[in-house]
Amino acid sequence: MQTVRIPDILLPAEGTDLSRWAVNACDQFTSDGEYWKNLSDFVGDAPSTLNLIYPEIYLNQDRENRIKRINSRMREYLDGGIFKTISGGFVLVERKTQSGVRTGIVLAVDLEDYSFEKGADALIRSTEATILERIPPRVEIRENAPIELPHVMLLYDDPQNKVLSAAERGEVLYDFALNMGGGSVKGTFIPNPEKVISALYSLTEGDRYGNGQKLLFAVGDGNHSLATAKTCWNMLRQTLSDEDQATHPARFALVEVVNIYDPALIFEPIHRFVRTDKPEIFIDRMPRCGEGSAEIVTDGNYSRIPFSADVPAGIRALDDYIARFIADNGGEVDYIHGDDQLERLSRGGVGIKLPSIRKDDFFRLIVTGGNLPRKTFSMGEGNEKRYYIEAKKIVKG
């Protein structure tokens, strides 16, 4: 098994203002233009990952030129001494947020061992249904990029904490406060990656889930980002010799892996917001059944409704209803991280505040039932998502 790899990791060189360098995941605050404007004003002209990513709020705005600027800035940073290279180990990431200190490890995984197909038995699997229509614009962003900056977080099932217990702590690589209310983050070099890899592989031993399947990692955040990396690799590998396929840097994706039992890893539901001028019709026709509960939010007011105790099944039924409603009545749906944002937006439509799945059930659900519905869960609030710090080359040379 060679699913986990030791990458050459790019970090900002000494002297970089890290508070301006690191920014939140591009798929957050997609209905909050003020967030991204304030972030841009704060970053200014400083070297920043904001110049190297494509915030998805702007995905349909001048995409071709924005992508060209991103790729050009990536090459400028590579050639201009903005990066330094860390080799021979992993990075232990300790992220302090309102939920506590979440601990992860930045490493590389082999995309040949990952699948986003429903029902796949790969060692790395998507957890939510992948919307294929979302991949092509993200391929446009990645296909000519010389580096990747991951907001992908993979989860592993380690109740005995074997993996982190195996990791030695070396040099502190960074330690700073994050912008826009993101808390703080500390990165420490792990000089014994082989021992960590061995501990990870031990998690696949035996028949843990009762059906003989092996599952090493499940995608927690960044499902479409990793699916895009896989799609780009599948296209590229067709042009390569067998020898080049085995070693090409685009085959290996940089990710952060986190134990699902980390006490600061809080599973949050991703709420639905329907922007509509017919909220009364939406609410009146909305299905209500089940032994669980959800809440409707309109004009900042909450009302509880019955909802399926099988949360994934309830979300599938709700999403089907929302799709039918929009087809018949117009409107738009957005997926909202955080109660406060949902309440604020609810003055322009209808919010549905959803219950969360239990993380104790998470791996079993993936192994026995396949993908969860799209946008079923989120790991924490929007400002707790992974900030871009590390990068990796995905081109040769």
Image (cartoon, rainbow, N blue to C red):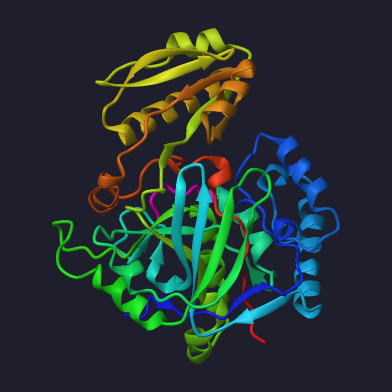
Q: Is residue 380 above or below residue 118?
A: above
Whether residue 349 is visible to the viewer of this picture, yes or no, is yes
Q: Is residue 131 magenta?
A: yes
Residue 361 horizontal/vertical position (percent): 25, 45
Q: Is residue 137 magenta?
A: no
Residue 281 lies, in percent from the top left, at 52, 9
Quadrant in the picture for residue 374: top left
Q: Is residue 283 above or below residue 110?
A: above
* Viewport quadrant of the N terminus: bottom left
Residue under the image location 35 percent in, 77 percent down:
197
- Quadrant position of the C terminus in the picture: bottom right
Give whichever of 150, 210 is nearer the camera.
150
Could you tell me residue 18's position as x and y percent?
A: 70, 62
Q: Is residue 376 visible?
A: no
Given residues 208 and 375, the one toward you in this image is 208
Residue occupying image coordinates x 75% and y 77%:
78
> In the image, is 20 to the left or to the right of 272?
right
Question: Does residue 236 appear left or right of residue 199 in this picture?
Answer: right
Q: Residue furthest bottom?
A: 243
Determine whether 376 is above or below 84 in the image.
above
Image quadrant assignment for residue 30: top right
How would you classify the magenta stretch by its main secondary structure? loop
* Magenta stretch in the rendered image: 126-132
Image position of 72 (left or right of 342): right
